[in-house]
Structures are given as C-alpha cells and as structure tokens.
Image (cartoon, helix red, strand yellow):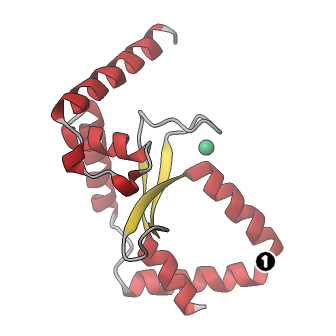
Amino acid sequence: MIIVVLHYISNIMATIDIPDKICSHCGGIRWKTEYRKSTKNPENKILIYRCSVKAGESYSKWRLQNLEKAKKYNIELCRIRRANGHYKTSKEKERNKQKAKKESDTLCDNYIYRIIFSSVDRKSLNRSNVPQELIDIKRKQLLLTRQLKQLTK
Ligand SMILES: [Zn+2]
C-alpha cells in the first residue's frame, strides 16, 4: 500500500492550466502531469499529460467501487504528503499561478516548448531538436488561435 502511494506521489508532478492545449474530450485546459517509464528505455522517464477531468472521473469511478480502500489510500496520501512537505502554502500556490499566467501571457520560449512537447511523442525528441524557427511558428499559430477564439466568441 505505502509503496503504491509513494509511487503515486513521486510520479505526480502537478496540475497545471495550459490554455493552448485543449482536451478534445471535454474542452478543458487543466492537465495533470505525471512521469511514466519509457517503454523503449525503462531508465528514461517521460512526462505525460492527462486531462484533469478525465483523471478525476476515472478516480471517482474507482473510489465508488473501493470505498474502504480509497479511504485508507487518502489518509496515507495525506500523511506522506505532510511528512514530505508536499503541501504548498497558499502563497506558493499563488506564486505558481502567477508564473503560469505570465508564461501564458508572454508566450515565452519555455511555454512554447512545453506545448510542443505535450502534443508529440517525445521519446525521440528533445529540446535541441526543435529549432528556434519552429518555436516562432508555433507562437504565431497560438496567437492566431487565440485571436480567432476572441473573434468568434
Ligand atoms: Zn478532458
């Protein structure tokens, strides 16, 4: 049990809003990031994005069928998180939120990289493979999508 929970915590990175990455399933922009072992090379960890809504739904379904387990799981999760300082203060949360907003507002290179990486199979792609030209094109594409969205509101 504890190993499962520890595994869970060490693999869940964060829940983040990516306004330019829209879920085709629910139209949401909130994503859970998580590290998974690469199937090609188990030494490698790859960052994957799961729709937060979908992840929540499948957890709720599981919880209903495993109420006792879920209860224990939650208690254990809280305990480990507290022990490891995983709980962010509201100040830290606010800071992260501000940072995410700033990145999305300015469309900085880091943000564009993340968008590109989140939509491709990144097993064979790394940052140095992505030329600056492509980053600039992607930035323009995002701007266009945003403007079209504004116009068709
Ligand atoms: Zn979704």
Indicate yes or no: mark 1 CB to ligand 1 under 8 Å: no
Residue 71 in picture, x, y percent from top left: 69, 81
Q: Nearer the viewer, residue 121 or 96?
A: 121
Taking the spot 33% from the left edge, 66% from the top edge, the residue there is: 89
Q: Is residue 131 above or below residue 133?
A: below
Around disc 1, counting alpha carbons within 10 Å, would you say few (fewer than 14), some (14 to 19), or many (20 or more)? few
Quadrant housing the N terminus? bottom right
Residue at numbered disc 1: 66
Residue 120 in picture, x, y percent from top left: 43, 44
How many labels were placed on the picture?
1
Horizontal arrangement in the rendering, residue 148 relative to residue 77 (left or right):
left
Taking the spot 41% from the left edge, 46% from the top edge, the residue there is: 118
Amino acid type, residue under disc 1 in the picture: Asn
Horizontal arrangement in the rendering, residue 146 relative to residue 53 (left or right):
left
Q: Nearer the viewer, residue 116 or 59?
A: 116
Which residue lies most toward the top here?
Answer: 151
Horizontal arrangement in the rendering, residue 21 relative to residue 52 (left or right):
left
Which residue lies most toward the right here?
Answer: 65
Q: Is residue 81 above or below residue 36?
A: below
Residue 113 in picture, x, y percent from top left: 28, 43
Q: Is residue 150 above or below residue 139?
A: above
Numbered disc 1: secondary structure:
loop
Q: Is residue 115 above or below residue 56?
A: above
Residue 96 in picture, x, y percent from top left: 29, 53
Rendering quadrant holding ligand 1: top right
Q: Nearer the viewer, residue 80 or 92?
A: 80
Taking the spot 24% from the left edge, 38% from the top edge, the residue there is: 102
